[in-house]
Amino acid sequence: MKRSQRVAEAGIVIMAVAMIFLTGCTTEKEREAARQYREEAEAYMEEEKYEQAQEAMKQALEQTPEDEELLAASEEMNQKINQRIDEINAYNATMEAARQAIEADDAAALDALQESDAGKALVKAAQETGSYIYMPEGGTSGKGIGFYTFNDCDCDQWYYGDYQEGSREGNGIWYYVSSHTEDKSLYKEVYQGSWSGDAPNGTGHQVIALGDTVDTDQDFNVENGLFYGTYDIKDSLEDGTEVTGQYELQKGKYVTISDEELEKNNFVVPAEPHLAIAFLYNEAGEIKSCTMVYAEDATRGVKHFY
């Protein structure tokens, strides 16, 4: 009787094991492996490593292929990946259009791109981290184009040039353009030159223009985005008198002319905080004019560019 019972019990066990395989039930070990693979997939998604995320989710499903909740999570993940890839392709197309505009020095085309729906979508994407960088050849080093946003000003700006491990290093163009001016004239600031340490360093050329009026178009020595050195002024007064002079920049700030010097040369000292750039002389060496900057801190350079 006992022997028959043991045989019967053994038969029940065998049938139970068979049922496990037939119904697709999984072991605790497989469920734990699936959980770990799923966590890996979610971590890869956070890092935007989509191929690795899909591979990890595939391995999770191999452990528990009948898990409906996991199947639904996998489908949702793939939908998010496809949507994100479409977004990235759109951003990169915008970056490519910006690159072409910068290479052609086409400020109007770049401004139109910024004002487009695609440009506004790029602004929103870049605001999450402060920048969006596109490297056509992939990786983090080489020739690329970056779009940069700032929390303290509405001055979205572009960089096109050399990168080294995600930092601006080598030669590059920094470009700012805006049509949001009083008379809707196009305003642009462009710096082209040397970069190191993710900042302008070395020598570079700056152009500042509003519409057809060019304010600055000259070479500068630059250290961490601030201009240094002594520079010549060539200008003409309203009566046509040609004037010349010099001004000096230290750490991007004009070397101030004292109030005493202003008064001695018959210039009225402004009541507002001010810095004087330079005296302007005529051919006879007489002081004819003085250009004033009414600001507490008239930082001269491209410091606001990065």
Image (spheres, rainbow, N blue to C red):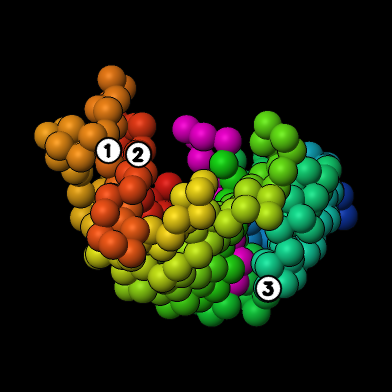
According to the image, label 1 marks what residue? 275
Judge the density around disc 3: few (<14), some (14-19), many (≥20) Cα neighbours within 10 Å: few
x, y percentage for residue 262? 20, 37
x, y percentage for residue 268? 27, 28
* Amino acid type indicated by mark 3: Glu
Q: Is residue 147 left or right of residue 194?
A: right
Q: Nearer the viewer, residue 5 or 157?
A: 157
Q: Is residue 16 left or right of residue 230?
A: right
x, y percentage for residue 197? 33, 66
Give the residue at x 51% y 40%: 150
Which numbered dot is residue 177?
none
- Range drawn in magenta: 144-154
Give the residue at x 58% y 57%: 214
According to the image, label 3 marks what residue? 103
Give the prevailing secondary structure in the magenta stretch: strand
Query: Do the residues under discs 2 and 1 have CB atoms within 8 angstroms?
Result: yes
Residue 208 can be seen, yes or no: yes
Give the residue at x 36% y 38%: 293
* Amino acid type indicated by mark 1: Leu
- Separation of marks 2 and 1 at Cα, in angstroms: 6 Å
Q: For residue 164: magenta?
A: no
**Which tag, 2 or 3, sits closer to the chain's start?**
3
**Which tag, 3 or 1, sits closer to the chain's start?**
3
Q: Identify the secondary structure beneath mark 3.
A: helix
Q: Identify the secondary structure beneath mark 2.
A: strand
Using the rendered view, name the quadrant where residue 102 is placed: bottom right
Which numbered dot is residue 292?
2
> Furthest-right residue in view?
22
Q: Is residue 234 left or right of residue 50?
A: left
